[in-house]
Amino acid sequence: MEERLKTFLQLVKILLGIILLQCVNLQVFHFSYYRRMSNQNCIRTIDLGIPRGKILDRNGRILAEDRTCFNLVYVPYDIKNSREVATTLSDIFGLDPNELLKQFDKPSSNPFERRILKRNLTQSEIATVSEYAFKLPGVFVQAGLDRQYTLKEGTCHVLGYIGEINQDELDAMKDEGLKPGHYIGRYGIEKQYDDFLRGKSGGYQIEVDAHGHQRKILREIAMIPGNNIVLTLDQSVQEACINALENRHGSIVVMDPRNGEILALVSNPSFDPSNVAKYLKPPYSERTPFLNRVIAGQYAPGSIFKIITEIAALETGEIGEHDRIECTGSMEVGDKIFHCWKEEGHGWLDINMALPFSCNIFFGTVGAKIGVEKILEYAKLFDFGKQTGIDLPGEKSGNLPSPDESGGAINLAIGQGALTVTPLQLCVMISSIANGGNLWRPYLVKKILAPDGKVIKEFQPFVKKTIFISDETLTVLKRGLRNVVRFGTGAGANVSGIEIAGKTGTAQIAQRELGLPTRGAFACYAPADSPNIAMVVFLDEGSSAQAARIAGSIIKKIYTSEETQSETTISETQEVQFLPSGSEGFE
Amino acid sequence: MENKNNPGRILLTVSFILTALGILLLFSASKGITAVQTGIPVYIKQIIWSFFGILLFSWLKEFDYRHWNKLAHILYFVCLILLLVVLAVGTGRAGRWIKIGWFNFQPSEFTKFVLIIVLARYFSLRDIGRFSTLLGGMIITGILFLLVLLQPNLGTAFLFIVIFFAMAYLEGAKRKHLLILIVIGILISPFLWMGLKDYQKQRLTVFLNPWKDPLGKGYNILQSKITIGSGGIVGKGFLRGTQTKLAFLPEFHTDFIFCLLAEEFGLAGVVALLFLYYVFLTQIWKISMTTQDPFGRLVGIGMMVMFLTQIFVNIGMACGLLPVAGIPLPFLSYGGSALFVCFISLATIYNLHRNTALF
């Protein structure tokens, strides 16, 4: 008994010793771990998001900027009764409670961090949330940033949009301070210049109690604003293009032929950059709103390609300025009959008249004379089949076919072969005619400014190559292009007071056979003698004459001419071009 | 008696230091709690309890411990009644309190003291070497155990069993007999398990792997470990604890008061506390060893076992070594009932020492 009592004293020592050892274990050996855990427990970080720089037009008008908004956020750690919270939230916002539950219960690396549940709450939604706050522990309304686009859909293909970062991107960009819920550029300029536009996220470190309610702010981390980007784009030109295109599907690109600056870039159908999700689903998605037709739409150039054929013809000397060919309305090649768009024929004409009237027989005959290889050589000279190098993501290069796959000299010569181009490539091409042979690299960003206004980067015009075209050829060509608008197929573009030169084209003529609408296009520059504007208009559905009229109206607006648009001499000209009677024949 | 190193004096000094430390910790904690407190801050209440506790002590230290022997039957009966009342009308988190005015009376706390008195009397009157004596003691304990378990107050119920076995063992019960009782207990336990409330089952299972669900059921264990561990060697400093202040631990002013100490005073504070408890326990041990009266010795042993078990279970729980059982830390934990029982026990031991010294 005495013995047992003595042993008991040993037991006291052992038990207290066990406690001591465990405390040493916790407080010494695992101290840093538990200290970190302790800090995480009561410290919540409130992330206010990544601020982005403004996007300005060439005159400093704001095209995109951040505005303060209010978001619904939650702290996974603080949501103790996820079912009840999910039910309450679904009642308020009509969100799917199962989706919410899934989100709440998703294991997270840092359950103490606020996550965005719903962006851009309305005033009434904010009121409702605060009304039900007692039923929503762990759910808060928090200030955030909302990207606003002045012209909304109007600049969506230029500016693009921003979207929440995904896991793959997070892994790739983890050194840049990005966290789940942060937005990065997804498309357009927002994507292309994301590194410059994106600032550093700011927020608060707050101390909270067990219910997740803020007790005090421990630290404040100021946001670091992103850089501002000044575009070459001109808001008024852009707006003129938007208004002129109306809701037709198609695209317009306006460029300064003296330096490659893009003044306007419009593609329709468009999407709302603030509500991208809606356009990713049918029926909107079926109209390919995310296709930037200017840089990624690839079309047969149609008669616009006759410019290249004419240069090739004159430069190679296969035909002289005054050599005449008779157009009877059709021609036979082997066992196939080709038609001119003008059934009764143009009669005898030389190249000076063939271009304004876009005679298929003339250019088809010339094309056959020059040969496929030579035409493709000239096409290559103008960088068809190559990306223009514009500073936008997703540019397509079009198709510069091999001679065997080109569809034959005649089809190729009139732009109906296998060769496809983007509207931007045509714009660069017509610009080079306008400026006498300089192939500019088109660009959208003029300069990048630090938040304090200091210039970080300035982009200079860049001539990719200078194509040698003889003065004689150029004179003939330019006169022809001017005449297209004066009295030819592009007369719809005629604007009094401004001399416009251009060329019409109707792409994918085969569509007509299928009963589909034609794809009308117009490439032009103005003023004809000292061009400072080059433009390409492409219509998914419509005639080239319509395209010409749209171009004319835009140019008129640009020069704010007060005179009314002159009456067109040839109305609703329909170009009907070479059509292989048996399409397999030219393969 | 006049000797400065006499156990009684040391016992008193240590328990007053502990009480003061408890108030200090509760004061620190009060800087944080918002939801729990209504009206009077917890530390003020504890000061009031301490005042009454000391009053109770100064009256009971003159109360001959042998009177408790005579009162044993009545005390046991009163306890049974109170525990039945608690089961009928109990309030509070686990339904273990009787609300009398603004005093939440907790019968299970007093039952610990009463059980020690009753067992001390019982064992002192019978031959501990006989199995029937042990069986009788087991039944005495078992009735209280079941009533407290049903509240449900797993920790205190467990404490009763420990007190019974330890008193029996230290008084000289045969190992074989005790083993038979343990086997019987193990055979009964599945039925007890089925009788447990879900939250108690969960507490026991989650104890095995609290990391599996750090935000749910393992919350208490995890948080208390974080709180202790984050204190480090020197602690975060008085009033500078973050964990306990922010109400991360439920019941931290009662069950998890140790965390507060460990967080704010670190390992240094833990060592100091353990030293105080060690001194406290050894003084009771000394008193128990020197007393010639079997009842007195059994009371002393019982008190020692009670205090040691409470200390070990409470801190062991906070450290993540034992399940979250809801046993107060002697003199430190907030609560009138617990503090009163501590002071009544202290007075009894003090009186025992006085009587022993007088012999």
Image (cartoon, coloured by chain):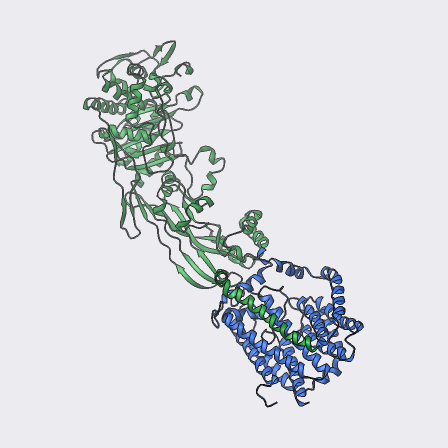
Q: Is residue B62 among the parts visible in the rendering?
A: no
Question: Closest to the observer: A496 or A39?
Answer: A39
Residue A31 is left or right of residue A386, and the answer is right
Residue A525 is left or right of residue B7, and the answer is left
The residue positioned farthest toward the left in the image shown: A471
Question: Closest to the observer: B311 or A557?
Answer: B311
The hue in which chain A appears in the rendered picture of the protein: green
Question: Closest to the observer: B121 or A122?
Answer: B121
Q: Position of residue A98 (x, y in %)?
A: 58, 47
Q: Position of residue A122 (x, y in %)?
A: 47, 51
Question: Closest to the observer: B15 or A228?
Answer: B15
The residue shown at (66%, 66%) is B94
Quadrant of the rendered image containing residue A405: top left
Q: Is residue A26 among the parts visible in the rendering?
A: yes
Q: Which chain is blue?
A: B
Quarter of the picture containing the C terminus of chain A is top left
Instruction: Judge whether B21 appears above or below A232 on screen.
Output: below
Residue B45 is left or right of residue B133, and the answer is left
Quarter of the picture containing the N terminus of chain A is bottom right
The residue positioned farthest toward the front in the image shown: A3
Q: Position of residue B77 (x, y in %)?
A: 76, 76
Residue B200 is left or right of residue A101, and the answer is right
Quadrant of the rendered image containing residue B47: bottom right
Q: Position of residue A340 (x, y in %)?
A: 34, 15
Instruction: Judge whether A26 appears above or below A512 on screen.
Output: below
